[in-house]
Amino acid sequence: MATSVPRGPRQVFSAFQWSMKGLKACFTHEASFRLEVYLAVVLCPLGLWLGYGGIEKLLLVTFPILVLCAELLNSAVEAVVDLVSPEFNELAGRAKDMGSAAVFFLLIMIPISWGLILVPHLQG
């Protein structure tokens, strides 16, 4: 049985640095991620301003952040697939397409959630 390594401030800081390195790499190399970051930079403060109460604010901010999370994972899958299978492979293409589809579904949820939350406020 493996023994767990204690997590101290140094290990937590290292994990933070690796996360920032991943964000920087994705922002540098992925145009889609950059566009989604710009979208989140606009939508998150707007959602905090337009939402009534904590639950609405949370829901309006959640989907733009989830899009970023999914795009990070999709980009990681694409990088690994390209490394392992540089030539065309049907399974590799399928994996990349599925990751893209996950991002697409979350992008669709942004206008749906915003519409369901904000349209009633505009009507009433």
Image: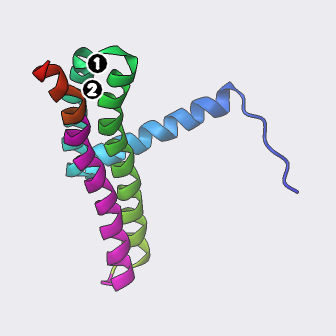
- The residue drawn where x is 33% and y is 50% is 71
Name the amino acid, label 1: Leu
User: Residue 106, how many percent across, how many down?
Assistant: 30, 48
Q: Nearer the viewer, residue 118 or 2?
A: 118
- Residue at 42% from the left image edge and 45% from the top image edge: 22
Magenta segment = 87-113
Front-most of 94 and 54?
A: 54
| Quarter of image, res 115 | top left
Graded by Cα atoms within 10 Å as few (under 14), some (14 to 19) or many (20 or more), the crowding at tag 1 reads: some
The quadrant holding residue 49 is top left
The count of marks equals 2
Q: Residue lying farthest front? A: 124
Left or right of residue 120: residue 72: right
Q: Quadrant of the N terminus?
A: bottom right
Residue 44's label in the rendered image is 2
- Amino acid tagged 2: Cys
State whether the magenta stretch is mostly helix, strand or loop. Answer: helix
Dot 2 falls on a residue whose secondary structure is helix
Instruction: Please say if the residues under marks 1 and 2 sit with CB atoms less than 8 Å apart.
Output: yes
What SS does tag 1 mark?
Answer: helix
Residue for badge 1? 48
Q: Quadrant of the C terminus?
A: top left
